[in-house]
């Protein structure tokens, strides 16, 4: 019988190959690999066992992988990366939503560093190549009383998947499709975690840099856009992102802050 990797023609994740390139102090130093998991986000959000700041859980196959807005995230075992990072430090002082933007920047930077892909970011945190989606991020948190006590950043990256049958809001692509070669998932994960640790430092010390770097990678600012949030729909000009990373929409002469929604060009 085929195992979960062979089923899709994928490869077994080689932890030593990942570990040798990991250059962090805390992020990923507690690394958990699971063959099959419901959702790496759900586990890290709710687990009493995995409670350490910087813990990374890589799930080779997710039975209930989740995307934004209660969508599902489906990903082949052995070909892609689906993982979550647990953050427990300094949560009160800093703006959590900037970690959301910062995480998409980290993925963009890693894909550029290793594969010279031309990455664009779409608010709030889609990672695109030539308007196609190569990665998505789902940030979730839990609170105790009024205090956030856990933040989990879940990242799904299409790495070596050759094709994407089905219908999608945004057409998916993978590193393999864009770079035209099979690539090392281990090397990509270590690069992301290395950059992620640096990003957390920037978040604490120089949050404006995250906002500016994100602005530079978003090609939609200044464009007429449509925002859909469930039944609600709004149109206007994408004016900017504010200091918390929320979208500022200009409708006629008024500025409106948008916290949620799917953005598309009008
Ligand atoms: C999106 O684009 O809608 C976000 C997708 C996030 C998917 C990742 S895969 C790892 C982590 N676990 C989940 O259940 N979801 C995130």
Image (cartoon, rainbow, N blue to C red):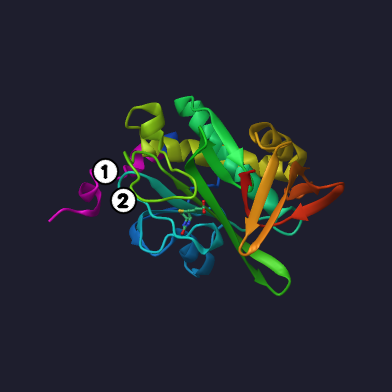
Asked whether, in this view, residue 75 is left or right of residue 2, the answer is: right
Mark 2 highlights which residue?
A: 77
- Whether residues under marks 2 and 1 lie with C-beta atoms below 8 angstroms apart, the answer is yes
Label 2 sits on a secondary structure element that is loop
**Residue 231 can be seen in this image:** yes
Depth check, front residue: 124 or 14: 124
Residue at x 59% of width, y 46% of height: 125
Which numbered dot is residue 10? Answer: 1
- Marking on residue 192: none
Vertically, is 250 above or below 194? below
Q: Quadrant of the N terminus?
A: bottom left
Residue 29 percent location from the top left of the image? 48, 48
Q: Is residue 10 magenta?
A: yes
* Residue range (magenta): 1-18
Is 76 left, or right, of 70 in this rendering? left
Where residue 87 sits in the image (x, y, percent)?
Answer: 59, 55
Image point (16%, 53%), residue name = 2
Left or right, 256 with reference to 235? right
Count of numbered tags? 2
Above or below for 46 versus 12: below
- Magenta residue check for 52: no
Q: Nearer the viewer, residue 6 or 171?
A: 171
Q: Give the residue at x 71% y 54%.
A: 234
Quadrant where the image shows the C terminus: top right
Q: Secondary structure at mark 1?
A: loop
- How would you rate the neighbour count of disc 1 (Cα within 10 Å): few for under 14, some for 14-19, many for 20 or more? some
Of all residues, the one furthest to the right in this rendering is 253
Task: Classify mark 2: residues with Cα within 10 Å, few (<14), some (14-19) or many (20+).
Answer: many
> CA–CA distance between discs 2 and 1?
7 Å
* Horizontal arrangement in the rendering, residue 266 relative to residue 211 (left or right): left
Q: Position of residue 102 (x, y in %)?
A: 63, 43
**Residue 49 place in picture, x, y as percent:** 47, 67
């Amino acid at each position: 019988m085929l195992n979960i990797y062979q089923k899709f023609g994928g490869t077994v994740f080689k932890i030593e190959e990942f570990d040798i390139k990991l250059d962090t102090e805390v992020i990923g130093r507690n690394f958990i690999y699971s063959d099959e998991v419901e959702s790496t986000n759900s586990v890290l959000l709710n687990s009493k066992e995995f409670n350490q700041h910087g813990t990374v859980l890589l799930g080779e196959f997710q039975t209930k992988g989740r995307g934004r807005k209660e969508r599902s995230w489906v990903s082949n075992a052995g070909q892609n990366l689906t993982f979550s990072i647990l953050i427990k430090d300094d949560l009160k002082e800093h703006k959590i939503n900037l970690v959301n933007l910062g995480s998409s920047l980290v993925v963009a930077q890693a894909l550029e560093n290793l594969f010279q892909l031309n990455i664009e970011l779409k608010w709030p945190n889609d990672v695109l190549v030539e308007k196609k989606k190569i990665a998505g991020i789902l940030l979730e948190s839990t609170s105790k009383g009024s205090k956030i006590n856990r933040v989990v950043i879940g990242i799904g990256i299409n790495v070596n998947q050759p094709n994407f049958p089905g219908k999608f809001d945004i057409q998916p692509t993978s590193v393999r499709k864009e770079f035209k070669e099979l690539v090392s998932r281990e090397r990509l994960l270590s690069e992301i975690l290395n950059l992620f640790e640096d990003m957390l430092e920037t978040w604490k010390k120089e949050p404006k840099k995250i906002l500016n770097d994100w602005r530079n990678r978003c090609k939609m600012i200044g464009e007429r856009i449509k925002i859909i949030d469930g039944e609600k729909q709004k149109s206007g000009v994408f004016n900017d992102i504010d200091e918390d990373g929320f979208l500022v929409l200009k409708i006629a002469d008024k500025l409106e802050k948008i916290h949620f929604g799917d953005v598309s060009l009008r």
